[in-house]
Image (cartoon, rainbow, N blue to C red):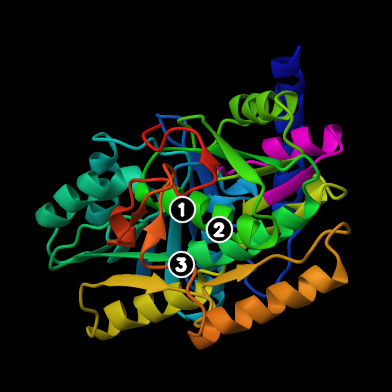
Amino acid sequence: MARNRWKFAAVLMLVFALFAAACSSDDGDSGDSGDTTTTAAGATETTVAAADGEVFKVAFVHVGPTADKGWSWAHDQGAKYLQNKMPGVEITTLESIPEGPDSQRVFEDLAADGNMLIFGTSFGYMDPMLAAAENFPDVTFMHATGYKTSDNMGNYFGAAEEGRYLSGMAAGERTETNKIGYVAAFAIPEVLRGINAFTLGVQEINPDAVVQVVWTSTWFDPPKEGDAAQALLDSGVDVIAMHQDTSAPGQAAEAADAGWVGYNTDMSEFAPNGWLTAAIWDWGPYYVATAEAVKAGTWVSESFYGNMADGMVNIAPFGPSVSDDMKALIATRQQEIIDGTFAVFPDPIVNQDGVEQPLGDIFGMDFFVEGVVGSATG
């Protein structure tokens, strides 16, 4: 019964998001919805043509649908911002491309089609993109969330842990049972960093609270992610947080009169009463800067890590249950993070077993901090 309920909720979510995307007229919109086709693999491809004049072709490859109102949607908003700000750009968008070796062909097809800059926006694209970059040395490849580079491939991400910490503060205020649930995707460093930062934020406000993690091994599977949230709620948690691309965990929380911390974007429309806040992204300015550098011939391979100070990372507007005092405290912490006077992760840090250890390289983080319940290996 629960699975059927979340399948229905997921359909409603996608229909709403598709309708909203079709009606959108925000500043990032290019004003041209483009030509959309469906590939043999079932993925959606959209090409937005450039205005008259010199054409510079840019492609985006996403692991989920851009109507998810989550991770892929946020990147797609960045692509639309690029389309609007940079004359002569022709953008091709591929949605729902599976991670893994088969994605190499996708990247190579885009390169062969004349795209001079290709963005792959999911962790599992890293090695296939690296192989494609070797075969197309005159094309620039950019991989989101990974750690490998080459002469013509860079990577980029941002300090989501900054927003995660602040959202954890809101969750620490909201919980009454001192049990917070976290629906997590895969046990990779970016997800572990987020869980740890969130937990540290929770415990600044409520040292007695714990964060219980359930792994789904998915990025976008609304029924499975909704069921995971429901299992946590059934165990007694009264706030749900997540590293997922769907609002299904939030809908489960709202139905149980629990709080909800989202991710990627402001998803409050899907569960407004339970909504607290979320760590969110603004990719557009980075996409413009990268495309301009590639076009001008000044691009160099690098690992870029944005943050709150440069605007890539932020937090979403607060929900109705976040108190004014908490909003003020979070604003203070946020400014300290921006100023560099507050560090999300202490060094040394106390791990899940209560043992103090060196913080180490956060990009290889493979442990949980004290206060997390669950396995850091998935």
| Residue picked out by circle 2 | 200
Residue 185 against residue 205 in the figure, above or below: above
Give the mark nearest the N terminus, 1 or 2: 1
| Residue stretch in magenta | 244-261
Please identify, in this view, whether the residue under mark 3 or under mark 1 is nearer the observer: 3
> Which amino acid type is marked by label 2?
Leu
Residue lying at the far top in this picture: please name it: 1
Disc 1/disc 2 C-alpha distance (Å): 37 Å
Marks 3,1: beta carbons within 8 A: no
Image coordinates of residue 296 in percent, x first then y, are 27, 86
Residue 194 or residue 33, whichever sits in front: 194
Instruction: Tell whether position 220 is magenta.
Output: no
* Residue 246, image quadrant: top right
Q: Which mark is residue 93?
A: 1
Residue 209 or residue 27, whichever sits in front: 209
Residue at 24% of width from left, 40% of height from top? 105
Say whether residue 34 is left or right of residue 140: right
| Residue picked out by circle 3 | 159
